[in-house]
Amino acid sequence: MFNPILFRHKLHRSPELSGSEKRTHELLVKTLRTFGYSPIEDVGGHGVVVKIDSGLPGPHLLFRADTDALPINEIAVHQHSSEHDGIMHACGHDGHSASLMALAYRLSLFTLQRGTVTMIFQPSEENGQGALAMLSDEKWDKGKIDYAFGYHNVPGYPLGQILCRENTFACASSGVSITFKGKTAHAAYPESAINPTFAIRELMQDIDVLPITLGGLTMATLVHVNLGQPAFGTTPESGQLMVTLRSDSNKCFQQLCEGLEERAKAYADRDGLTLDIDWDDNFNATINHSEANMLLKQACKDIGFHYADLNEPMRWSEDFSAYSAQWPSAFFGLGSGTEHPPLHDPHYDFPDTLIDISSKIFEQIIRDMNGLR
């Protein structure tokens, strides 16, 4: 008999970074085959897809879990600690995968009455590339998907509390590195230099002001500044700013990104500087659809699970946004405990209790929409 907790512990012991989830992929495929499935392998990298088709008309539901880990050295000590130095499941993707595997096992014991259920185990969520890679991969026939569902554990909320939200659940975000390069000069003759200091200084002020002009939950967080060299006799030749941008609105997020880039270009042109802009870890906002959210909440009611509506979206980002942009979707949170270590913390460990809760919610959605016997 399949034990999802032991399965989660096995995943936790062997974490793999985004794009390198080979052993994870092999374990997922091997386990799914023991349930009688014929999974589609290596989708969008090391992704795995399982489709259950009743052969009869009905809704097509998609359920997604992420599989990758983080470059963090685990400090937590337990029997299933990471066996790979510098890599750990510090975001709970091992738990999300165990939840979907528990659902796959439960579905293998029943017959789908109508429609289709697709389960996807997605790699490379942390770098924002996995969802788009799976969507663009033609190895699997997506067909017409009516609703997509996923979840994420959320430390800081009571253990097992179901967290719902209409419209935006998680923010859009991106990292941007802006580098100005000019020409150095002797510090006694600064007028002969092409100095990036003024552009850096003014852009830092813009970072504070731009989000305010756009309103809503819109943020620009300065994370790194580097200017010149530690030499008293020489003016700076180059300067770099690294900023994280985020917003609960895709429209405001686009305006924030474009506004910052426009100002950087204007300062570079004005001061005769060369400009290099690099974008990284791009995520759109994860937008919940009202109908999909209604199905999620109804399933919770059917099995006696109480849910809470969030007053504001999560500030972090999720590449589930790629699915919510394509299909009506509902993404929800599950509280990991009010005192639980935060996500991406070296002491983090996914609470096993959440596996049963999340898989039962997924199963009930299927019972309500497709029927099981």
Image (cartoon, rainbow, N blue to C red):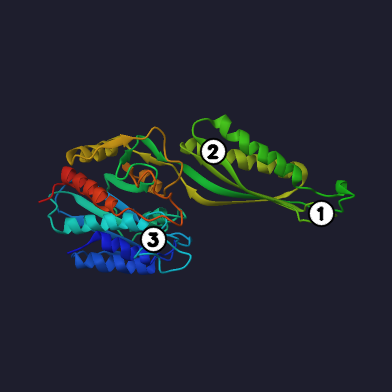
Secondary element type, mark 2: strand
Mark 2 touching mark 1, by CB under 8 A? Answer: no
Residue type at mark 2 is Met
Q: Is residue 250 left or right of residue 261?
A: left
| Residue picked out by circle 2 | 219
Q: Residue 184 has which mark?
A: 1
Residue at (86%, 48%) from the top-left corner?
190
Q: Closer to the camera: disc 1 or disc 3?
A: 1
Against 98, is 29 above or below? below
Mark 2–mark 3 contact, CB under 8 Å? no
Residue at the far right in the pictured view? 188
Label 3 crowd (10 A; few <14 / some 14-19 / many >=20): many
SS for dot 3: loop
Q: Earlier in the sequence, mark 2 or mark 3?
A: 3
- Between the C-alphas of marks 2 and 3, the distance is 31 Å
- Foreground of the two, 355 or 157: 157
Amino acid type at image mark 3 = Gly
Asked if 345 appears above or below 307 in the picture, the reply is below
Tell which of 117 and 344 is nearer to you: 344
Which of label 2 and label 1 is nearer to you? 2
Residue in front for this viewpoint, 94 or 100: 94
Residue 167: percent from left, percent from top: 37, 35
Q: CA distance from mark 1 to mark 3?
A: 46 Å
> Which residue in the structure is indicated by mark 3?
44
Name the spot of residue 353 as percent of width and height, x first: 27, 51
Q: Sequence-wise, which precedes: disc 1 or disc 3?
A: 3
